[in-house]
């Protein structure tokens, strides 16, 4: 039986290998410092070490203004929490990526049908956005995110997610508590508790735009108990420890009563 063997020499890729653009520069090198072969089931595999990837694009200091186009919004990212609620300092790897920030610039909007639709958030508004949305940019010494208005989940003027005002077709749901026992009466550990897909609607957005640019009301309302898609939306934790999820109305599958 033939044994496949893979061989390769260590390689290094730096930002110098890419085309340069006026005013934009790579914030750090993309570098693979070394890797070594591993054996598994007779095949040689590779173990990579020292892989560094930085997604943010740095804008040269000579540019002092950044104006989003169309339905895009520029958000100044909120600084990641450096401590736990108990005051324990978190290492960089344990700090959760922020999903909130302040709107610092907006585009001119977009055209839907024959109507011109302006951006629904204003400069200075505190917003929450989808976890993997947009393009990160280092601008004027701070981290910013350029994203489409539709990637903004809602407006949040306080530090408690229960006060969020959803935008467009988004729905904010308070997640039902997981079952503590099995049907046979056995207590479940936290690890074995199934993530609920049921919750109570706390707030809803004004609805999506139709082809003429008019809002279509959502079919769910605050107070409804709903069943939603298991892997949809963005998860949040409220100030009181309660679990919340913000998702699109299309991810709500049924109203329970």
Image (spheres, rainbow, N blue to C red):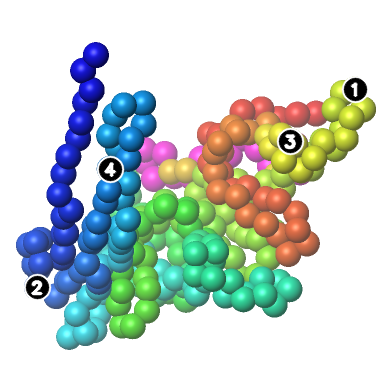
Distance between mark 4 and mark 1 Cα atoms: 50 Å
Residue numbers of the magenta segment: 210-226
Q: Name the residue under label 4.
A: 37
Circle 2 crowding by C-alpha within 10 Å: few under 14, some 14–19, many from 20: few
Q: Is residue 86 left or right of residue 24?
A: right
Residue 108 is at least partly visible in this image: no
Distance between mark 1 and mark 3 Cα atoms: 15 Å
Q: Mark 1 points at which residue?
A: 184
The quarter of the picture where the C terminus appears is top right
Sequence-wise first label, 4 or 2: 2
Q: Which residue is drawn at 71% across and 71% down?
A: 85
Q: Name the residue under label 3.
A: 192
User: How far across and down, in percent of the image, does residue 59 sit?
Assistant: 22, 75
Label 3 sits on a secondary structure element that is helix
Q: Which residue is drawn at 42% across and 39% down?
A: 210
Residue 108 part of the magenta segment:
no
Q: In this view, does 151 lie above or below 56?
A: above
User: How far across and down, in percent of the image, does residue 82 sit?
Assistant: 57, 75
Sequence-wise first label, 2 or 3: 2
Quarter of the view holding residue 15: bottom left
């Amino acid at each position: 039986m033939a044994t496949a063997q893979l061989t390769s020499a260590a390689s290094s890729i730096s930002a110098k290998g890419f085309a340069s653009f006026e005013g934009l520069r790579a914030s750090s090198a993309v570098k693979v410092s070394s890797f070594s072969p591993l054996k598994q089931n007779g095949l040689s595999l590779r173990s990579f070490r020292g892989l560094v990837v930085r997604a943010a694009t740095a804008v040269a200091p000579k540019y002092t203004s950044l104006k989003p186009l169309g339905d895009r919004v520029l958000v100044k990212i909120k600084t990641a929490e450096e401590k736990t609620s108990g005051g324990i300092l978190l290492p960089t790897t344990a700090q959760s990526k922020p999903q909130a920030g302040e709107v610092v610039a907006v585009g001119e909007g977009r055209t839907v049908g024959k109507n011109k639709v302006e951006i629904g958030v204003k400069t200075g508004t505190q917003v929450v956005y989808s976890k993997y949305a947009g393009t990160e940019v280092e601008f004027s010494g701070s981290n910013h995110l350029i994203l489409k208005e539709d990637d903004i989940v809602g407006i949040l003027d306080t530090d408690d997610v229960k006060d969020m005002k959803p935008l467009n077709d988004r729905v904010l749901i308070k997640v039902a508590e997981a079952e503590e026992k099995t049907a046979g009466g056995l207590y479940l550990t936290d690890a074995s508790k199934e993530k609920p897909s049921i919750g109570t609607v706390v707030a809803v957005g004004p609805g999506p735009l139709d082809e003429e640019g008019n809002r279509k009301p959502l079919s769910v309302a605050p107070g409804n108990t709903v069943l939603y898609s298991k892997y949809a939306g963005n998860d949040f934790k409220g100030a009181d420890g309660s679990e919340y999820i913000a998702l699109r109305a299309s991810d709500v599958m049924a109203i329970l009563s």
